Image (cartoon, rainbow, N blue to C red):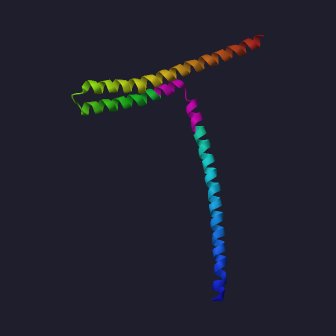
Amino acid sequence: MENKSSTAPCVNKDTTTTEKKLSEAMEILMEGYGVRLHRMEEKMDLLISLIRPRKRACLCLWMNHSLMRNLSRLYLIKRSSSTLLIMLVMVLVFLSVVVFPVVVVAVKAFVASVEVLAAAEEERYLIFF
């Protein structure tokens, strides 16, 4: 019996030490996971930015077209006396969701291509001089 009582404090001490080590290991693991997750988000942002602006615009247009199709189905299901109001809301949603992002992406693509051309012309002039 004395052996059991004498080993009991050591077991508790070892248990707390093990718990501390486990908690430290978990903290290190979570920090590493957070870093990996952040890097993964950066890679996804980079991949999204590498998609050509026209393809981004087409993807945006396709997603917004499906949204408008679903809204029109909702309109057909729920015909009411406020048809004009619903149509107005659908047009506003269409303009804000489809037209505006496509115009923004197109303008950004145009500006980016103009900047690339300007940089190429500057390099060409520097080569000639």
Which residue is the extreme one toward the bottom?
1
Q: Nearer the viewer, residue 28 or 53?
A: 28
Q: Is residue 97 above or below residue 26?
A: above
Q: Is residue 36 above or below residue 5?
A: above
The stretch of residues the image draws in magenta is 44-58
- Residue found at x 26% / y 24%: 84
Looking at the image, residue 104 sits to the left or right of residue 128; the answer is left
Q: Nearer the viewer, residue 99 or 44?
A: 99
Looking at the image, residue 107 sits to the left or right of residue 70; the answer is right
Location of residue 126 by image quarter: top right
Which residue is the extreme one toward the left?
81
- Residue found at x 72% / y 16%: 123
Which residue is the extreme one toward the right?
129
Residue 20 screen position, x and y as percent = 65, 65
**Quadrant of the image for the N terminus?**
bottom right
**Quadrant of the image for the C terminus?**
top right
Q: Please tell me whether residue 49 belongs to the stretch shown in magenta.
A: yes
Q: Is residue 23 above or below residue 33?
A: below
Residue 112 screen position, x and y as percent = 59, 20
- Residue found at x 65% / y 68%: 18
Q: Please tell me whether residue 27 belongs to the stretch shown in magenta.
A: no
Magenta region, main secondary structure: helix
Residue 118 screen position, x and y as percent = 65, 15
Looking at the image, residue 113 sits to the left or right of residue 105; the answer is right
- Residue found at x 63% / y 63%: 22
